[in-house]
Image (spheres, grey):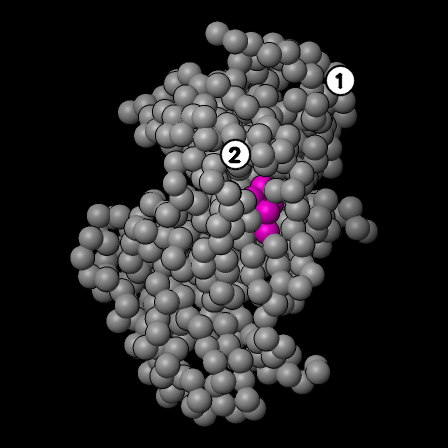
């Protein structure tokens, strides 16, 4: 099968990786670049667990071809914050009990980051809409919305 | 059940740098090729095993197709993202219904990936952008092996998932003419949650003469196998003086467009439900568009 050498900037680090046309960005992130902080949920754009930032824009990596990411910047959850240096959004998720099993959390945080970049003062309804492509089977969403809203409020004060 | 984790079928991938190259590729591969834009429909269909193209022609890098131009009408290139249309101030001011439809087309990340032209080409009866484009008399610009052709968008849809596009043809852009000065418009939809696929949707664009309807366009989605313009509803308003009863009557006429048969197989709701939903949706959309038309008048 024909392979291509592509270059992506994964969480600010330049990576070269060999891919086929069939591989999605999600597959190479998890299987070839060890970025298992990106979650593989439905594989068809319904759940948002695989969300990453591609050149700063939130996309579902399961519906993005690896080849499409060539030359681009990919930011995953760990590029937003990690154990040592968590992002305020992550702290807010912890503080508000917005994490239960945690499967949706990576995607939620990525989407919250992209959304808050563009809207610093969101209403609950706007947050609901922003995370409408991210499914959570545990929390019932309210605590996730609390976390995102309070993060916006705190960072302003 | 298919495995949606992987793209099982093998295909070749091309990223042409010009429209000419893309057209040549599609001419060469014909029905074995597919144009790829946002990928939110095509890649899902490939993963589900519904289609298995041998060649994907990715048009996202083609400079002339990523452009949107709002001078003298609106020109939406085939690779223009839904999100860009939603955030354009020109679109919000002049083509309000389209900005609203774009904003409701799906979740944030899908709007960052999907394109307006892709939404049109997929030709799902429940798609959100077609009604909002049709109320502004949109035109489809199509490139193919034998040159370019321009078709009014209302002739573009054949039936569910089927358009007039020939296998080798590419929809290159959608063009909306400059709207009449006082035009007001609105798009609304009913769905389980806003980002969901529409149960029904409706777009309205109208012009006023003080208290009278000068002209009105009403297009409904998800009521038949293609988007439908409700001429009886439009005609019942034109030249008439604004009244709540008049609008009530027009929305009843619009609700008659809901086609009884076949719809059930889409499995989302019954025709009776759709009728009721269209009625209240059209009523609200007319009121909204009416208020917006008046705001514009006052501003001038
Ligand atoms: S895994 Fe990508 S949206 Fe569900
Ligand atoms: S915390 Fe379990 S899916 Fe959201």
Image quarter in which the N terminus of chain B is found: top left
- Image location (x, y in percent) of residue B211: 52, 91
* Picture mark count: 2
Quadrant of res A74: top right
Whether B202 is drawn above or below B196: the answer is below
Which residue is at the far left?
Answer: B261
Quadrant of res B46: top left
Residue drawn at (48%, 50%), measured in percent from left and top? B149
Disc 2, SS: helix
Please name the residue that numbered disc 2 is placed on: B23
Please name the residue that numbered disc 1 is placed on: A13
Can the viewer see residue A63 in this picture?
Answer: no
Residue drawn at (53%, 13%), measured in percent from left and top? A20
- Image location (x, y in percent) of residue A7: 69, 16
What's the chain of the residue with tag 1? A
- Image location (x, y in percent) of residue B226: 33, 55
**Residue B11: which numbered mark, if any?**
none
Residue stretch in magenta: B76-82
Q: For the residues carrying marks 1 and 2, which lies nearer the camera in this image?
A: 2
B77 magenta-colored? yes
């Amino acid at each position: 099968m024909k392979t291509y050498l592509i270059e992506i900037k994964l969480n600010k680090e330049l990576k070269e990786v060999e891919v086929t046309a069939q591989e999605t960005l999600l597959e190479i992130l998890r299987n070839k670049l060890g970025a298992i902080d990106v979650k593989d949920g439905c594989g068809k754009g319904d759940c948002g667990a695989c969300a990453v930032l591609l050149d700063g824009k939130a996309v579902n990596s399961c519906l993005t071809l690896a080849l499409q990411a060539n030359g681009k910047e990919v930011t995953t959850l760990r590029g937003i914050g990690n154990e040592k240096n968590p992002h305020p959004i992550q702290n807010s998720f912890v503080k508000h009990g917005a994490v239960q099993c945690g499967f949706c959390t990576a995607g939620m945080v990525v989407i919250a980051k992209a959304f808050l970049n563009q809207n610093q003062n969101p209403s609950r309804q706007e947050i609901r809409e922003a995370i409408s492509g991210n499914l959570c089977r545990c929390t019932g969403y309210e605590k996730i919305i609390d976390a995102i809203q309070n993060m916006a409020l705190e960072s302003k004060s | 059940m298919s495995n949606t984790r992987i793209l099982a079928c093998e295909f070749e991938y091309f990223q042409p740098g010009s429209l000419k190259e893309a057209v040549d590729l599609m001419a060469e591969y014909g029905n074995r090729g597919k144009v790829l834009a946002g990928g939110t429909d095509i890649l899902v269909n490939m993963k589900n095993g519904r289609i298995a193209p041998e060649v994907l022609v990715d048009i996202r890098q083609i400079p002339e197709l990523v452009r949107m131009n709002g001078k003298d009408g609106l020109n939406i290139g085939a690779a223009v993202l839904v999100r860009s249309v939603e955030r354009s101030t020109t679109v919000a001011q002049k083509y309000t219904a389209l900005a609203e439809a774009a904003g409701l087309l799906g979740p944030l990340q899908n709007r960052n990936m999907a394109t307006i032209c892709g939404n049109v080409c997929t030709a799902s009866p429940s798609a959100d952008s077609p009604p909002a484009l049709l109320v502004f008399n949109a035109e489809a610009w199509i490139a193919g092996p034998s040159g370019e052709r321009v078709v009014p968008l209302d002739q573009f849809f054949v039936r569910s998932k089927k358009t007039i596009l020939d296998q080798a043809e590419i929809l290159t852009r959608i063009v909306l003419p400059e709207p009449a000065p006082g035009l007001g418009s609105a798009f609304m939809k009913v769905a389980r949650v806003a980002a969901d696929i529409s149960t029904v949707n409706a777009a309205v664009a109208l012009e006023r003469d003080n208290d009278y309807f000068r002209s009105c366009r009403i297009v409904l989605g998800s009521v038949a196998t293609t988007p439908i313009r409700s001429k009886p509803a439009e005609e019942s308003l034109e030249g008439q003086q604004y009244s709540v009863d008049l609008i009530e009557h027009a929305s009843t006429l619009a609700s008659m467009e809901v086609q009884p048969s076949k719809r059930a197989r889409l499995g989302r709701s019954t025709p009776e439900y759709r009728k009721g939903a269209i009625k209240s949706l059209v009523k609200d959309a007319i009121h909204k568009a009416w208020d917006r038309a008046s705001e514009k008048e006052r501003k001038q």
